[in-house]
Amino acid sequence: MVIFAINFIPMLIDSHCHLYGEEFKEDIEKVIERAEAAGVRKFYLPGIDSSAIDSMLALEARFPGKCQPMMGLHPCYVKENYLDELAIVEDWLSRRSFAAVGEIGLDHYWDTTFAVQQVHAFKTQIEWSIRFNLPIVIHTRNAMQETIEIVKIYQKQGIRGIFHCFSGSYESATEIIKAGFYLGIGGVLTYKKAGLAEVIEKIGLEHLVIETDAPYLTPVPFRGKGNESSYLTYVVARLAEIKQCSIEEVAAVTSANAEKIFVL
Ligand SMILES: [Zn+2]
Ligand SMILES: [Zn+2]
């Protein structure tokens, strides 16, 4: 006999959220509580730069087995001192296990002053992911093709991971999947003008993971306010609508994908 639970909440994984940020300092307990009530069981925390490491690891200690840290230098934080920052990343990677190397990549949206250094930092951290056998979580903005080309250089060495906050074209999505990567889908999917729904309609769920990128990229209907992990349900609902499947199926497939990718 099959028994169906009445208020069944599917298990969700927020594959990318900055819950260690200042924004959550006052009410992190409540944020986690609301997320768990919405079905979110795990929270993957991307690294930014050395100033964020202490609060990230403190959150892991406070919610062990739930909040899982990554380690990496974000492209927007590649500045004059980036070699010192990279040395800190390498030191941490050699000391303990992390869920992934991330978030790393290229961002030419705000500033291109350190474009060359961004490439160097990205490649160096990809090489460390190979050395420590970790997946990578990629951040790319206004640099999609350049990012894909760099990934291709290392493709034969078995690199794997996520292009987080994917909002590119169908062609880019296909190239990313061919390179063995997953697409991280978040609040942008709920923005009508983004055109992402049309792309994702043609991509199988088996290539997707879901994320909030909280406190950024808040989904509709809360767009304009701060984002939090409980809002992941709006991404799931929109994804189910686009893929014409159940919320349970979206939850099951994307959670299984996330568990396949991450080390912790
Ligand atoms: Zn990012
Ligand atoms: Zn992020």
Image: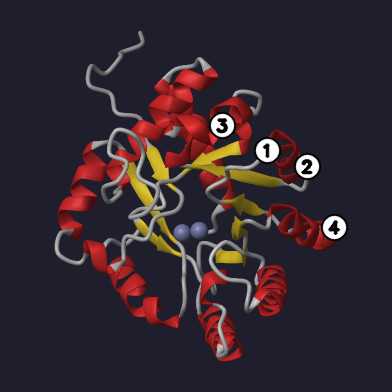
Which SS class for mark 4?
A: helix
**Which residue is labeled 3 in the image?**
195
Of the pair 213 and 87, the residue shown nearer to us: 213
Mark 2 belongs to which amino acid? Lys
**Quick one: label 1 or label 3, which is nearer the N terminus?**
1
Which SS class for mark 3?
A: loop
**Quick one: label 1 or label 4, which is nearer the N terminus?**
4
Q: Residues within 10 Å of mark 4 (few under 14, many from 20)?
A: few
* Residue 51 point in image, percent of width and height: 39, 81
* Residue 65 point in image, percent of width and height: 35, 58
Residue 62 in sight in this render: no
State how many labels appear: 4
Mark 4 belongs to which amino acid? Lys
Mark 3 belongs to which amino acid? Gly
Specify whether tag 1 is near ligand 1 (CB below 8 Å): no
Q: Residues within 10 Å of mark 1 (few under 14, many from 20)?
A: some
Report how far apart the C-alphas of labels 4 and 2 lie in the structure.
Answer: 12 Å
Specify whether tag 2 is near ligand 1 (CB below 8 Å): no
Report how far apart the C-alphas of labels 1 and 3 lie in the structure.
Answer: 9 Å
Which SS class for mark 1?
A: loop
Specify whether tag 3 is near ligand 1 (CB below 8 Å): no
Relative height, residue 31 to residue 253 (above, below):
below
Residue 178: mark in rendering = 2
